Image (cartoon, rainbow, N blue to C red):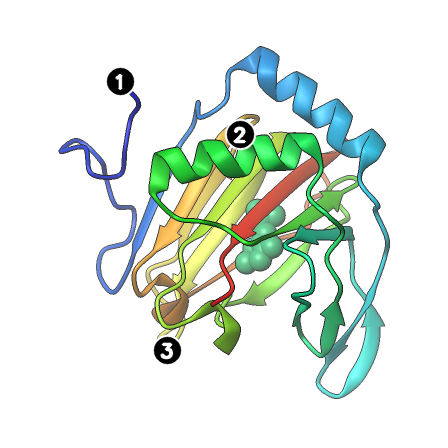
């Protein structure tokens, strides 16, 4: 039988105000190697600008949005039209539906070319994601440190190394009370792909 978030041994990493669970071996090594290569080669990667404190700056990574037709999605002052689901992204979306029960509508893809690419502190709390969004974050390639801290107090900082083939599932009130980032690091020279599956309401 498949593992599920309703298993009694599931463990929440957050001490309060939300649920975040890490599944290190969600995809096997073979499947992960296969997806990693195909995603790098076939997705429509672009470096896009975002608005930070009123100024447009280039994001320090490449991105690509895939999802249901006719439903644009954006963050930090940009709106993106999704590309149609590819076979592999659709396959992963179906697997995540089986596992979580959530029908994801979009996947934001991030390509960190090396440790100099990053993502700053943020919450995934756009109104179109609804009140308590479930976000399924899948990683292929280099391991990068995912940091989480409490939004109001900036305390209770956690560091989770997101490994090849892993799934990090953020649910409940996570996006109200906790923020997260992928910091830059001089130690990592290899690329990493991260996919965050989201559901627009
Ligand atoms: O690359 C990651 O693990 C995080 C991505 C993320 O937080 C996002 O796309 O909102
Ligand atoms: Fe995020």
Q: Is residue 167 left or right of residue 62?
A: left
Q: Is residue 98 above or below residue 158?
A: above
Q: Residue at x 36, y 34 (%)?
A: 99
Q: Is residue 140 above or below residue 130?
A: above
- Outermost residue toward the front? 69
Between label 1 and label 3, give the one nearer the viewer.
1
Location of residue 68 in the rendering, given as x and y in whole percent from the top left corner: 63, 55
Q: Mark 1 touching mark 3, by CB under 8 A? A: no
Q: Mark 1 to mark 2: distance in Å?
A: 24 Å
Location of residue 10 in the rendering, given as x and y in whole percent from the top left corner: 22, 35
Locate ligand 2 by image quadrant.
bottom right
**Earlier sequence position, callout 1 versus callout 3:** 1
Q: Which residue is mark 2?
A: 163
**Residue density around tag 2, few if under 14, some if 14–19, many if 20 or more, within 10 Å:** some
Q: Mark 1 to mark 3: distance in Å?
A: 40 Å
Q: Which residue is mark 1?
A: 1
Residue at disc 3, secondary structure: loop
Q: Which residue is mark 3?
A: 152
Visible in this render: residue 182? Answer: no
**Residue density around tag 3, few if under 14, some if 14–19, many if 20 or more, within 10 Å:** few
**Earlier sequence position, callout 2 versus callout 3:** 3
Visible in this render: residue 51? Answer: yes
* Quadrant housing residue 42: top right
Residue at disc 1, secondary structure: loop
Q: Mark 1 touching mark 2, by CB under 8 A? A: no
Q: Is residue 121 above or below residue 91?
A: below
């Amino acid at each position: 039988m498949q593992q599920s978030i309703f298993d009694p041994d599931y463990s929440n990493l957050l001490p309060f105000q939300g649920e975040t669970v890490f599944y290190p071996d969600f995809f096997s090594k073979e499947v992960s190697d296969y997806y990693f290569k195909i995603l790098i080669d076939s997705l429509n990667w672009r470096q896009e600008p975002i608005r930070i404190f009123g100024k447009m700056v280039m994001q320090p990574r490449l991105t690509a949005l895939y999802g249901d037709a006719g439903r644009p999605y954006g963050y930090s002052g940009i709106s993106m039209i999704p590309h149609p689901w590819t076979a592999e992204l659709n396959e992963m979306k179906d697997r995540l539906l089986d596992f979580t029960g959530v029908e994801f509508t979009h996947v934001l893809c991030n390509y960190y070319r090396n440790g100099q690419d990053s993502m700053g502190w943020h919450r995934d709390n756009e109104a179109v994601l609804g009140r308590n969004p479930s976000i399924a974050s899948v990683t292929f390639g280099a391991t990068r440190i995912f940091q989480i801290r409490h939004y109001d107090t900036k305390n209770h900082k956690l560091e989770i190394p997101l490994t090849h083939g892993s799934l990090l599932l953020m649910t409940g009130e996570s996006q109200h009370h906790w923020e997260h980032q992928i910091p830059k690091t001089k130690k990592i020279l290899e690329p990493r792909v991260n996919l965050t599956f989201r559901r627009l309401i």
